[in-house]
Amino acid sequence: MMDNAPFLSLPFQDLTIEGYSRAAVQSYWRIPELKLGFDLGAQPWDFMGTQTWFISHLHLDHMAAIPVYVARRRMMKMEPPTIYLPEHAVDNVEMLLKIVGKLDRGRLPCELIGLRPGDEIDLSREHVVTVSATKHTVPSVGFVVWEKRKKLKAEYQGLTGEQIRDIRLSGADVTEEKRLPLLAYTGDTAPGGLDACPAMYQAKVLIAEMTFVAPSHRKEKIHKHGHMHLDDWVERKDRFENELIIAGHLSTRYHDKQVKHYVHKAFPDMLGGRLKLWL
């Protein structure tokens, strides 16, 4: 494949987390097994086959590649993609695509669907996405992908297989839906956006921002601009129930050695090996 935009790849159990994220540069993530991606600050050619994307907010380093992505799929005669994004931005993104289409002299067909906190999107019979409010300098949202499972209702547990079959044949529904938080993505947010969605702490995989790590950077100013500091993670270290925690969106003010130094000092065991720096 064409190597036109960098990305890292991390296999974890039955999922693969792929992407790149650096503050003010570009952020984009994809989970191929779930057939979805988050944010489009750039668009690796390898990601073109993913048809469904969720945009957390409309800063350029998280959405600048929307026209490129849509145009590439049109050029390759692929189905128009579906892009979910904060509701307030739909009209402006439609206008952007029309302007780029005029310059490019080609249509940019896609389905733009506005989102509000509290919305739910059924991806398939097995997965649903929920939307939560985050705290940034522009309207922003985070996402949790849930795995849906059918479980025998409590009142029927302990019955034999034949008894359950007979009840089912009578027309009664013997199962109920159970949801397990599979993967969470915060986008850019001050810590309040993480705290407001407890499922993010419970998801099997959490992809979250850790923009600032140096002690000299003041948390109050960082929070005002809708970001998190390493200290915010330390204050919440006992809340993370996740099996894998990915810290991304690190500031370009730091080189990789600085980031590792500060984070390893704060988390010598990297939260029991669960914390991974996206560097």
Image (cartoon, rainbow, N blue to C red):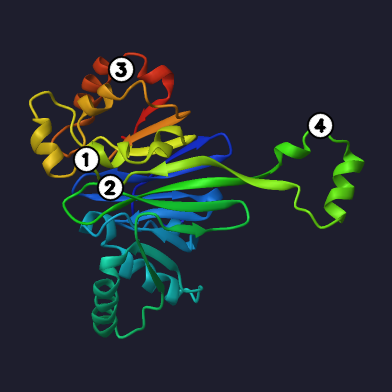
Q: Secondary structure under badge 4? A: loop
For marks 4 and 1 on the same chain, the one whose residue lies earlier in the sequence: 4
Looking at the image, is 180 positioned above or below residue 72?
above
Determine which residue is flagged by label 1: 190
Alpha carbon of mark 1 to alpha carbon of mark 3: how far? 20 Å
Question: Of callouts 1 and 2, which one flags the residue occurring earlier in the amino acid sequence?
Answer: 2
Which of the pair 111/147 is nearer the observer?
Answer: 147
Local crowd size for mark 3, using a 10 Å CA cut-off: few (<14), some (14–19), many (≥20): some
Compare marks 1 and 3 and give the one earlier in the sequence.
1
Kind of residue at disc 2: Thr
Extreme residue toward the right, this view: 162
The reply to whether dot 4 and dot 1 touch (C-beta < 8 Å) is no
Q: Which residue is mark 4?
A: 158
Horizontal and vertical percent position of residue 269: 37, 14
Distance of label 3 from label 4 (alpha carbons): 46 Å
**Residue under circle 3?**
267
- Indicate the position of residue 111 as horizontal and vertical percent values: 42, 73
Q: Could you say where residue 158 lies in the image, as x and y percent from the top left?
A: 81, 31
Please name the residue shown 32% across and 40% down the image. Answer: 196
Residue 3 visible from this viewpoint: no
Q: Amino acid at mark 3?
A: Phe
Closer to viewer: mark 1 or mark 3: 1
Which amino acid, by three-letter code, is at mark 1? Ala
First reached walking from the N terminus: tag 4 or tag 2? 2
Residue name at image x 30 percent, y 63 percent: 65
In the picture of the structure, the residue carrying the numbered disc 2 is 134
Element type where label 1 sits in the image: loop
Q: Secondary structure at mark 3?
A: loop
